Amino acid sequence: MRSALLALAALAVALPAAAADWRDLAPPAAPGAQSPHLAEAAAGPLLTWLEKLPGGHALRFSRFADGAWTAPVTVASGALFANWADFPASVEAAGGDLYAHWLEKNGRDPYAYAIELARSTDGARSWQRLGPLHEDRVASEHGFVSFVREGSGVRAFWLDGRLMPRGGAMTLRTARIEAGRVGAGEAIDERTCECCQTGAAVTARGARVVWRDRSEAEIRDVAIAGADGNAWSAPRIVAADGWKIAGCPVNGPAVAADGESLAVGWFTGAEPPRVQVAFSSDAGASFRPPVEVDRGEPLGRVDLLALSGGEVLVSWLSRQGGATTLMLRRVAPDGRAGAPWSLPTPVPPRSSSFPRALLVGAEVWLAWTESGEPSRLRVGAVPLATLPAPH
């Protein structure tokens, strides 16, 4: 019965549902903007993005309140590093404060950049620069940041390349930020994929982080770690896909949690290529066999939202009818899945960066970059009730 449910979930992707009730939420971003990021806050959803400047970029911020976006605020500008593959900037609310991160060049190498932080205590009217997230000053890659709220502060996870100039591997590290102070960094994994996004969520047992691991044999499956107390657990593989690839696929996992319920979604290129989600009822200590969400022509770029009853909403990019589109699908822990829903307009795969999803009341919000000369930011919403429920 279990295997039948998984097979049905995969085959249903061949019949995408018609788009309906799409609501456009045009953001106040200038032409040429890119890399949107959505975050929740009590006073209204937060949106950040990058805008081009002569010789650099600016990190811009807006809040959706009283049915409209607030006037954009510049958080930082200058030699900011813009990268389609990363989440190059974000803002997270915690304890009445706002914390922002962005990537900033710190060396001559094209991929030498640091993760910089800023804090606002007055609702984004002003920002205090905090300095780098990481204590090292090595001119190498630092990025792919995920934030979660932790107490009155935030915890950050990131990929850290401080060892790479000496022939070492990319590592996964974490640090806590509270009251404008950055705590000491801790290593979680000493060998990771170099440029796959991280994901993080908070469970009833504490924070959990997911990322693409990298074995000595170049197997790049998705791993998870958590801290139930003061120590981080050893990395554990969520599902043994056995994807062997000699280079970074630029396709990281996503995670969502509600209490003890946790789910991880990801793309694998192991045959057959597919998007899948694995569920846990013990905050990630163990997982059920993964549910296949799409094994047609998926491209990945997965995001994940926790719904009620352990159910999740998966978003990803897929080829449908010769075009690339952003897909949504509701999946239950027992393997049942609703029919997939597709965005009304095509989404070119590379220039779209990594579409982001956020649950806002009874709506699912989506943000992505629309290609063109110049590119532009797109934000829109669809009622959750219109997305087919698992059956």
Image (cartoon, rainbow, N blue to C red):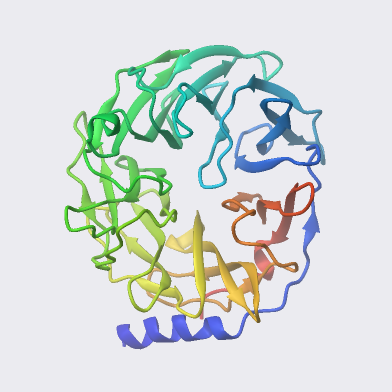
67 on left or right of 251: right
At x 79% / y 50%, what residue is drawn?
373
Count numbered badges in the picture.
Answer: 0
Q: Is 88 rendered above or below residue 210?
A: above
Image location (x, y in percent) of residue 18: 71, 78
Closer to the camera, 57 or 342?
A: 57
Image location (x, y in percent) of residue 25: 79, 49
Quarter of the image where one finds residue 29: top right
At x 54% / y 28%, what residue is drawn?
102
Image location (x, y in percent) of residue 297: 51, 77
Q: Is 63 rendered above or below residue 114?
A: below
169 on left or right of 62: left
Q: Quadrant of the N terminus?
A: bottom left
Closer to the camera, 246 or 358?
A: 246
374 on left or right of 36: right
Image location (x, y in percent) of residue 130: 49, 13
229 on left or right of 4: left
Q: Is 46 rendered above or below residue 340?
A: above
At x 66% / y 51%, what residue is drawn?
368
Closer to the camera, 308 or 383?
A: 383
Quarter of the image where one finds residue 243: bottom left
